Amino acid sequence: MVDMEKRRPLGSRNTKWAARCAGALADKGVTPNAISQASMGAALVAGFAFAASGYVPGPLGVSALLILGALCCQLRLLCNLFDGMVAVEAGRSAPDGPLWNEFPDRVSDLLIFAGVGLGSGNLALGLATGAMAVLTAYTRELGSGLGMPPDFSGPMAKPQRMALVTGAAILSVFEPLLATPGTVLTGALWIAAIGAALTSIRRAARIRAALLKRG
C-alpha cells in the first residue's frame, strides 16, 4: 500500500498529459516496478553519454552526446513521475514497490554524476557529488524512519539536481565559444555537491529540532 503522505509533491502529477501517459502505460500492462527499473536504464545511458562526451573527437559528436545525456536525465525524471502515478492513480502498486521506488534513484544519481565526472575529467568530484546526492535521500528516509513527514526540501533535491545537470549539458554544447571544454560541467558538479551537502544539513537540522521538540 502506498503512503500518500510520503509522495514527493509534484505539480506535473496533476497535469492532463501526465495522467494520459500514466493511463496509457497502465492500459498496456506496464508495471510501476518496470518503470522504476527503466529509470536506471535512462540514467545509465545519460552517464555513458556524459562520460563519452569528454573523449570523442569533433564538436558534433560531443554535442550529440551532451544532448542525449540531457534528454536521458529528463527521461529519468519522467520514469520517476510515472511509476508513482501508475502505482497509485492506476492502482497497480506491488508489495515490493517501496524498494523499487527508492533503490533505482540512488543508482541513477551515482551513474549520472560519475558520468559527468568522467566526461569533465573530474571523476573524484563526480563520485563525491553522487555520494552527496545519496546522502540527501538517506537523511530524508532517516527522518521518515523516526516518524516524521518526509522532507523533500532543497536547495538541491533530486529535481533541482537534474535540472542543473540538464542545463549544464545544454550550455556545454556552446562551451567551445565560451570557455575551456569541461568548465561548465565541472562547475555544475561543484554546485550540485555543495547544494546537496547543504540540503542534507538542512534536513538533519530539521530532524534534530523535531526530536528536541518531542523531548
Image (cartoon, rainbow, N blue to C red):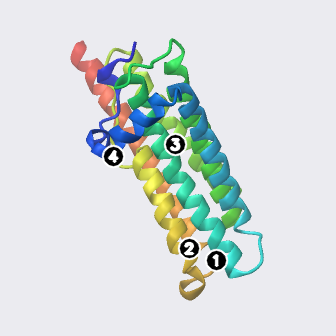
Q: Which mark is residue 172?
A: 2
Pick the front one: 27 or 90? 27
3D distance between C-alphas at marks 2 and 4: 30 Å
User: Under tag 4, what secondary structure?
Assistant: helix
Identify residue type, mark 1: Pro
Which marked residue is nearer to the observer: mark 1 or mark 2? 2
Look at the picture and state if 214 lies above or below 70.
above
| Whether label 2 touches label 4, CB < 8 Å | no
Pick the front one: 136 or 37? 37
Say whether disc 4 or disc 3 marks the residue closer to the N-terminus.
Answer: 4
The quarter of the image holding the N terminus is: top left
User: Under tag 3, what secondary structure?
Assistant: helix
Query: Which residue in the protein does label 4 denote?
Result: 17
3D distance between C-alphas at marks 2 and 3: 22 Å
Please provide percent x and percent y for residue 69: 60, 59
Give the image quarter of residue 179.
bottom right
Q: Which mark is residue 133?
A: 3
Identify residue type, mark 2: Ser
Q: Is residue 166 left or right of residue 64?
A: left
Query: Which residue in the protein does label 1 denote?
Result: 181
Say whether disc 2 or disc 3 marks the residue closer to the N-terminus.
Answer: 3
User: Under tag 2, what secondary structure?
Assistant: helix
Pick the front one: 111 or 131? 111
Q: In percent of the image, x 64 and y 77: which residue is there? A: 181
